[in-house]
Each structure stands twice: as structure tokens, then as C-alpha cells.
Amino acid sequence: MKLLTIEDTNSRLPFMPFSRPASSTNTQSEIDVRTNDGAVISGTSITKKWQHHKGRNRFFCDGRIFMSQEISLLCLTLFLIIVVMGLYFGFDAPFIGSEVSWAIPVVVAILFLVVLGTLLKTSFSDPGILPRATALEVAEFDRQCEEAGLGRSNKPVKSITIKGLNFKLKYCNTCRIYRPPRTSHCSICDNCIMSFDHHCPFVGNCVGQRNYRYFYFFIVSLTILNLLVMGSSVAHLVMLAKEKSSFVDCIKESPVSVFIFAACFLSIWSIIGLAGFHTYLLATAQTTNEDIKGTFNTKLRPTAQNPFSRGNIFANFYAVLCGPEPLSLLDARGIYNPYPNVRVKLADLPVFLPTVNGTLQDAESQHIHQTPISTNQVYSTTASANSSRNQFERNTSRASNGRYFDNGKIHNSANENNFDRHGPVEFRV
């Protein structure tokens, strides 16, 4: 078994879905790996986490750009917006600017940039993907299920309480994790998305916790832009009609304005409906997924309550649109660790510390047990010996008393950097 010299702290258990990975800024192309016998293997090639991503996504620029595999409708959306706006600035904008006011084309140009920016931000940002369980985490979870006498189809029931309401955590058989409330697995992207709203093919991405605000700004700004452009085209045609003898001559004079008006008129109804629907969802603190399922519909479920509502419409809008952006758990450019640590919670674990002579010593009562410690095992505990929820880690060898144990020998690590004396103490198997 090999241990990475670069410590990786992003491991989670399938039943610990709220822990977030530590972001990595290491840009080395090689690292050193040491084995249990102390040998160091230099120059081990490393890869980034995005290269091992199992969802149906694409990564570009070394993981900096994230997008879905289904982008055909996104390309169509960009094409239609750019073509219509190009025709507007080429034909209608000069006429409106000279005959009415140049302020209108300027406002339209600003809105056009906002629409493009929010669309690209929605399409190329992490919507709130929950990383899948690693192979070691899955193995450890399956082992615990087998010890508890549970089959593969029967998973431990877990729940969480939010504002006095109990929510059952669903287990995702694809990602092998327990999904937090409002999280759902997208069948198109093949990822678990936090605060999953829906998968929008026209933006080529899921809409979730991290990009919902940009999606809402996109449809609202697109609605306003559509109305302004359509109004400008109508104004252009009306002014030309006053100069021409017939409306047919007006159409011959500016056929592009007719095309722009027709394109805007056909699309405005669906865009207005979409913007109005999501405004309603924001006001009621719901997602599209919850509204379709009727999760908080009092007509279908008279006792249903929404614990995610802030109590009033303005607070709900502010929390989603103006609140801090949630951190990404994907860490696409982080260093991929093929030997991740596994953190396991145990209840009422006896507190043991190894002695120099290789026997187990009870840390609380100082009672010596005659069971010799294996040279490949290191047992430890947290700084509080009375805690009933002790934790341990595999593939690590630091202890909370400023020392670490390696093959039965005690070494001083007081000079090590970034050492937490009060963190969980770990053991290695």
C-alpha cells in the first residue's frame, strides 16, 4: 500500500454528503510517493480531478471551463440571439437612433451584453454537483452494511431535521451517496445536483444551486431585450408607413424589420411565461422539480410546509439572487489522489494509544492490555478521550499529541507545519 506525500483532505463517506473538498492549488506535474517501508518513489505522474469525472460533462482549458455534453440547443440559442441582434444593430438601430433617440440602441446593447454574459455563465458553471463516493468509500460503506446485516438493496435509513420538519435522505445508487434535501440526480448529465431545479437544454446545463441566479437574470433580461427590440421594429415600420403610400411599400423598404418583429413576436410568449413562472418559484421558495412533484402543494398535501421559505417574498428573492454564491464541491482542477483517506465514524470506540514497547494502552485509565499492536496498525483518538463519537482515518499516521507512530516507533512532529493539535486523531491499517 502506497501513501501520497501530498495530504489529501477531500475524502467523504457516502453518509457524510455535506462535507466539502478542500481546493487544491498544486500545479506540479509530478509528486513523490512513499510506501509503508519508507521507500520514496519520485516523479510519479499526477492527474487532475476533472480527468476522472464520471458525469456526462466536458472540460476545457485544464478544467477551467465546464459544460454539458448536449450543447446543440445551446448553439442554436446563441445563433438565434446573435443573428437577430446583428440584424437589429445593422438596420433598425441606426434609424431609431437618428429619428427617436440614441439612448434606445445603447440600452439595447447593454441588455444584449447582459443576456450573453448570463447565458454563458449559466452554461459554463458548475450547477452544484455533488462528487461521487470514491472506491474506498464505497467499499467501507458496503462493509458496514454487511456488518449490520443489510443487503445491497436495503440501505440504512437516514434523515435530517430542518425547522422542525423531518426529511428522509434518499440514497443515490449511481453516485453512492446520500442526497441532501432538494438534491436530485440528473439523468442527462448523470450527476447529483444540489437544489436541482431542472435540466435546461437551451442553456446546455443543469440549473441548480450555483447557477440558478444567472439563469433567472438571463430569462428576465432576455424578456426585456425582446420587448425593446420588437418595439423598435414596430416603430421603424410605423414611421416608414407615414412616408410611404402603402404598407406594402413599407415592407419593401425594410423587410428586415418585419423579420425581426416576427422572430420576437413568436418567441416572446414562451420567454415571458418562463420568466413569470420562475418569479413565482422565487417568491414561494420552490424549485421547478418541487413544483412538478407538488412537494409543498397544500392542495395535494394539506400538511405540507416549506422550511426553505424565509417568511416573505423579499427575503426569498434576496437569499437566492443576492446572497453569497455557494462554493463548488467539484474542485475540477484539484490534484487527483488515487490513494484517498477514508474517514469513519464509530460509536463508543475504546480509546487506545500505542506504547513504545508495542502494547496497547488505555488512554483514560492507563490500563495496559496485553494485546500486541501490529506494526502496520496505528490506533488513536481525538483530544477529548471522553468523546463517544471518535473518528479515525486510513493511510495517515499523525496523532493529536504532537507525535506520530510508524511501525511501532514514536516520532516527534512538533515542528511540522499545519498541524492541528485538536483535530481528529487517526490510524492506519
Image (tube, helix red, strand yellow):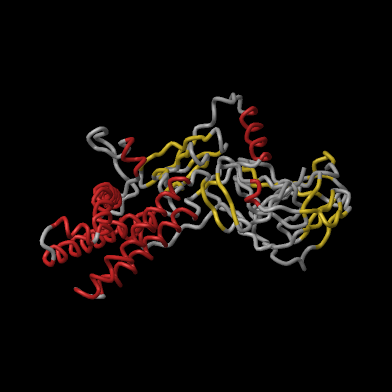
Image quadrant where one finds the N terminus? top right
Left or right of 248 in this view: 344: right
Residue 377 lies, in percent from the top left, at 80, 44
Instruction: Estimate the x, y position of residue 135 in percent, counting from the top left.
Output: 67, 39
Q: Quadrant of the C terminus?
A: top right
- 92 relative position to 167: left or right: left
Where on the picture, by quarter, is residue 248? bottom left
Residue 261 drawn above or below residue 379: below
Q: Residue 242: which quarter of the image?
A: bottom left
Residue at figure coordinates x 74%, y 62% from the top left = 28
Image x and y of residue 280, in percent: 26, 49
101 to the left or right of 282: left
Taking depth in this image into account, of 150 and 126 the one nearest to the observer is 126
Q: Position of residue 321 (x, y in %)?
A: 35, 60
**Residue 96: quarter of image:** bottom left
Q: Count up the numbered dots.
A: 0
In this orientation, which residue lies closer to the viewer: 240 or 157?
240
